[in-house]
Amino acid sequence: MPTYRCLYVVLMFCLLCSLPLLAKPKQEVLLLTYHFKAPYIVDANQQQGLYFDLANYLNRYSKQFSFRTEFMPRRRIDAMLQQSFGHVVIGVQPVWFKQLGDKVQFTQGILQENDIFVSLATNPFIKNDLNNVSGKTFIGVQGYRYIGLEQAEKNSSLIRFDTLHEENVLDMLRLGRGDFTVISQSTLHYKIRHGGENPALYYVAEKPHEHIIRRLMYSSNAPHLGAELNSIISQMKNDPAWLAVLEKYNLDPSFIPLA
């Protein structure tokens, strides 16, 4: 009898050893965006949009982290960045956060596009010289930084009228609240294709306001997070799964950064 009991104990020990170890729970990381606009956020309540699909894509490959996309106004993000910061801000580039210096790091680019000057076709804003905007009213977005335009605003030569979200700037333009606005190329394309916007109503200046390479920003105190993000991002441009996400939002290969 003791022999059988010993054998039973040995068998149970071997069985338990053969079971996979309990996986360590992944650390939740928020992907914060202050860009409330299609195609990045199409429906926040239904979690529809490219940035929600980005979280799903990262979760497919991440071994250490669980990502979830959440909208947060720029001013709240700026306040959070003054404290210890364990999350990620997505869709940004270093020049927008240069005041943080070496407190933050940026991944490789995930998308590239232009921010473009848009005005009404009946009153086109055709001058690309930002030194020549005296008396004009610019429709912007609360909390956004606009290179070049800010100096004109400080000089009191340019009047700025802000909306809460970039989603609304074309509405304000049609209502006559300003002479021109700046909107992302991807957003204008999406609104024309899916939002019923008539492209004949608008004039797009030949020279863009800014060329943007959208990156993910994380704390310099989180090197493991940055290493994993960069490892996943490095494979994106050749991954059919990510290319399918871009195609879903009518973004062609020109939106993929070369490096």
Image (cartoon, rainbow, N blue to C red):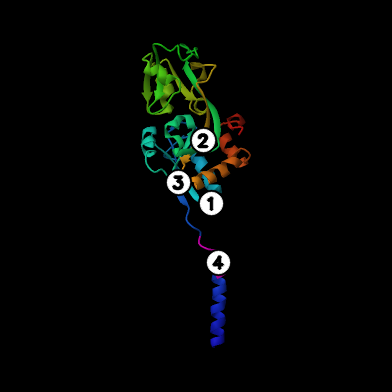
Crowding at mark 4 (Cα within 10 Å: few <14, some 14-19, many 20+): few
| 109 left or right of 175 in image | right
SS at circle 3: strand
Say which amino acid is labelled 1. Lys
Residue occupying image coordinates x 49% and y 38%: 105
Q: Estimate how packed mark 3 is, as few (under 14), some (14 to 19) or many (20 or more) residues with alpha carbons within 10 Å.
A: some
Q: In the shown orientation, is residue 249 left or right of residue 154? A: right
Disc number placed over residue 29 in the picture, else none: 3
Residue at (39%, 11%) from the top-left corner? Answer: 135
User: Callout 1 environment at 10 Å: few (<14), some (14 to 19), or many (20+)?
Assistant: few
Q: Is any atom of residue 93 visible in this view?
A: no
Q: Earlier in the sequence, mark 3 or mark 2?
A: 3
According to the image, label 1 marks what residue? 63
Judge depth for marks 2 and 4 and give the one in front: 2
The mark nearer the N terminus, 4 or 3, is: 4
Q: Magenta span: helix, strand or loop, mainly? A: loop
Question: Label 2 amino acid?
Answer: Arg
Q: Is residue 90 above or below residue 26?
A: above
75 vs 21: above or below: above
| Structural distance between the alpha carbons of marks 3 and 2 | 16 Å
Separation (CA) of disc 3 from disc 1: 13 Å
Q: Which mark is residue 215?
A: 2
Q: Amino acid at mark 4?
A: Leu
Mark 2 and mark 1 lie on one chain; the one further toward the N terminus is 1
Report the front residue among 184 and 202: 184
Quadrant of the drawing holding the C terminus: top right
CA gap, disc 4 to disc 1? 20 Å
Q: Which quadrant would residue 145 be assigned to in this image?
A: top left
Residue 165 image position (x, y, % from top left)? 40, 29
Q: Tell me where the magenta segment starts and ends, as one range.
A: 17-22
Is residue 2 visible in this depiction of the protein? yes
**Residue 21 counted in the magenta span:** yes
